[in-house]
Image: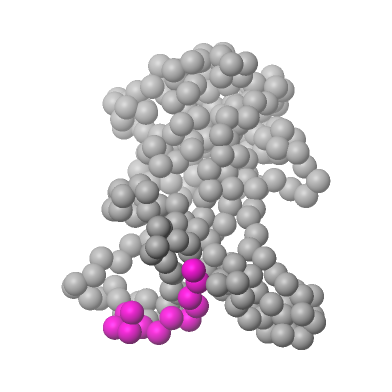
Amino acid sequence: MEDLGAASETILVGLDGDAAHFAHALAPDDAARLEGRADLVVADLRTVAMKSMVDSAHLGPIAAAKALLAWHGRHRFCSNCGAPTNVSEAGWRRDCSACKAQHFPRTDPCVIMLAIDGERCLLGRSARFPGSMWSCLAGFVEPGESIEEAVRRETFEEAGVTAGHVRYFASQPWPFPMSLMIGCFAEAALTTLRIDRNELEDGRWFSRAEAALMLARQHPDGLFTPPPIAIAHHLIRAYVERGAGVLTD
């Protein structure tokens, strides 16, 4: 570890049998120096996951480490009294040195949804997406909202589409920086699009057959969907395979 730089934070991620796994946070200057070393490959977690640079069994612990270290970086001072906080419980808690408050890692709930209109599904494109990738709409759950309310609000705010019935599909931890993606299907009631260009670069309805081509990366215009590491891929695949039945199955 010494030749990589001094750790600004060290946490215990967990145990794999008798082996303890730790995560270390490096100071920005030390991390920048590593990028120039020929004997190392430096990559962010998104790249590691998308390019399958490690065995999939390691992605969960790495994601937990990233989320925890991001939380530590943002909670060095007590939100109750402003005094410095100290690492406790091997990195799974921070304690205030003054008022003795205990602070625990947080997870931000985020809905990700595929709106469906029979044989069509709604996909959006963010300016930050690579190439010609299209994906499901998504957004954070606001205080006081249910999952269903958040799905309907985000679908309306981003695309102007009114949704009715909402069905839960699956969830996925998403450490960018510390979210829990809650995947849902939503039945579109009013389908005219009104795209919020502050949120999306574009949005449109895709036929089920066209979505299948995008999943297979065979679309004639080069359009594609996220890879299997993302829950969006599985939402779209379930719809391609089962159609509007995903709302009731």
Depicted 207 relative to depicted 223: above or below: above
Q: Nearer the viewer, residue 101 or 179?
A: 101
Farthest residue, direction front: 18
Quadrant location of residue 167?
top right
Nearer to the camera, 1 or 185: 1
Q: Is residue 206 magenta?
A: no
Residue 190 visible in image: no
The residue at the point 38 percent across, 22 percent down is 212
User: In the depicted view, which residue is nearer to us: 22 or 218?
Assistant: 22
In this orientation, which residue lies closer to the viewer: 169 or 199? 169
x 50%, y 71%: residue: 11
- The quarter holding residue 185 reads top right
Can I make out residue 39 in this image?
Answer: yes
The C terminus - image quarter:
top right
Q: Where does residue 29 sit, x and y in percent of width and height?
A: 39, 82
> Left or right of 123: which side holds 248?
right
Q: Quadrant of the N terminus?
A: bottom left
In magenta, the rendered stretch is 1-12
User: At which x and y percent is residue 171?
Assistant: 56, 39
Q: Give residue 103's position: percent from left, percent from top.
A: 70, 69
* Residue 14 % position (x, y): 48, 62
Q: Residue at x 29, y 73 (%)?
A: 35
User: In the image, is 1 to the left or to the right of 155?
Assistant: left
In-image side of 48 versus 195 (left or right):
left
Answer whether residue 8 is magenta in the image.
Answer: yes
Residue plotted at (30% across, 66% down)? 42
